[in-house]
Amino acid sequence: MAETPENKEQLVIDLSFVPSWARRPPSGPAVSGSGFEEVNRGGWRERGDRGRREEGRSPRGPRREGRDRREGKVEGTARGAPVEQKLDERLANLEITFLPERRGLAPLAHRLARSFRAYSLFEVSALFLSKPEFFAVRIAVREGGGQACRLYQCAACKAVFLDREAVASHVFSRHFERYCRKEEKETEPPKGNFVCVARCGMSGQLLGPPNYHGYGDRLLEVYKSRYAHLSLDTYRAKVETVHDAAVVEQWKNEMRRQVTYHFGEGEGAVSFARFGEAEAWFREHCLTEAIQDGDHFVMPGSDIPGLEDAGLRAFLQEAVQRESRFPLRLSVAVRLAFRHLGLHTFKTGDGHTFLTAVQPSAIDATTAVPVIREIIDYITAHPGCMRQEMLAGLRPGLDAAALADASTSPEVQELSTQLRWLVEKGHVIEFSDGRLAAPRETVARVQPACPRHGHSRRERRRTDKQGSHT
């Protein structure tokens, strides 16, 4: 997808960074003395460093058990009819990693930073999977997979294949004109007695009389340029013979336009009048440039539905569904990317990971001015409280109107001003749903931001290997 101001902004607009659990009204305390207990009602839960998923129902519905990996079969279809499909052994040697789309990272990081709030890493990661154009997928052969499993990528469109012949057919049918210039010239129509003409049953293109010397070339040209995903015998079965003088005459008129195929420029240029000769030249001299082979490639997520390799396509679609339910792999890349863009990450006592532009920093309330001490003490005693709840607790004599509009009460205005200062300095954490917490009782570990220019060479290489997808 070409980058334009419109679609760049669209990435920011569509990545609504308020998690699902933050859109619901709070009901009861969400923070305990050791960390969050109910902070994420959307279904994500991390346990320690392993990031295991909490048992229970996902916000996207119950998980569908579709693959029995021990049997190597896929069960179930879109219509619910049970089927059995043998799993390609090569797919078992592949490792899939998800990466956030680069164009959306910096705008989203700036937007998160301006709010001074903390956001669930898993929820932000899931947002990148909400639309295919917001993520890329890295396909790699597992270590020890050997030469038997190789990957091939079309240099033009980045489509990935497991078979070299399949990618060669793809390049020829989709990108032949990137390497070959066709020239049409007006000539005399074919001479001879033709009583019928063959016609492609799918496109309606006239292929010529079966007894015409150029019939074979024309049939192969249409087949390889448009229907290479079918077997040649299947395509031949769809060719129909038309006994109609008007159609034969139409074919003769079309044959007035003769095509010449040109490759290269200058002294190295070559030309061919027959399609078969042009194809042979293309395969011998152009495929090396048009096809890349290796043990890992990155492709846009939006290209997955159009992959011609049906087995690989299904394998990746299942991986996307699995990652959408629990975006563990993507969260690793998202965390690294946002740390490079100036965001800090921290874990709560029970293992939840959050992103924030403000590094949490506990403050000693005993040495603070009275109003600061009041706020810190209240939040410490009422972890997970909302702003309005805190104001009402500290100033119980004020009416609801004064609490809602700080400008009507100097007392509320002072509390709000000091609370905002505490949040911006990291002495109080304000989560994306508005809940408040004190760092000392909430944060178990902090990973400070580390912009790229501060990395060691070894760390830059490791990060680029995991997250690069130019």
Image (cartoon, grey):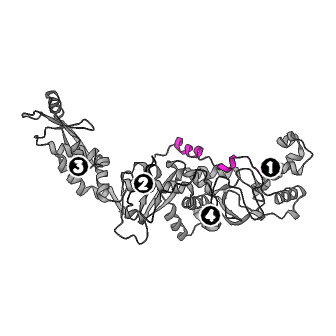
Residue type indicated by callout 3: Leu
Sequence-earlier tag: 2 or 3 = 3
Near mark 4 (Cα within 10 A), the count class, few <14, some 14-19 or many ≥20, is some
The kind of secondary structure element at disc 1 is helix
Q: Nearer the viewer, residue 249 or 101?
A: 249
Q: CA distance from mark 3 to mark 1?
A: 70 Å
- Boundaries of the magenta span: 1-30
Q: Residue at x 52, y 43 (%)?
A: 7
Q: Element under label 3?
A: helix
Percent position (x, y) of residue 426? 75, 59
Q: Could you tell which of marks 4 and 2 lies nearer the N-terminus?
A: 2
Residue at mark 1:
387
Q: Nearer the viewer, mark 1 or mark 4?
A: 1
Work out whether mark 1 precedes mark 2 in sequence or the reverse, and give the earlier one. 2
Residue at the image position 71 percent from the left and 50 percent from the top: 433
- Would residue 91 be found to the left or right of residue 468 on screen? left
What numbered label is drawn on residue 450? 4
- Which mark is first along the chain, 4 or 1? 1
Eye-nearest disc, 3 or 1: 3
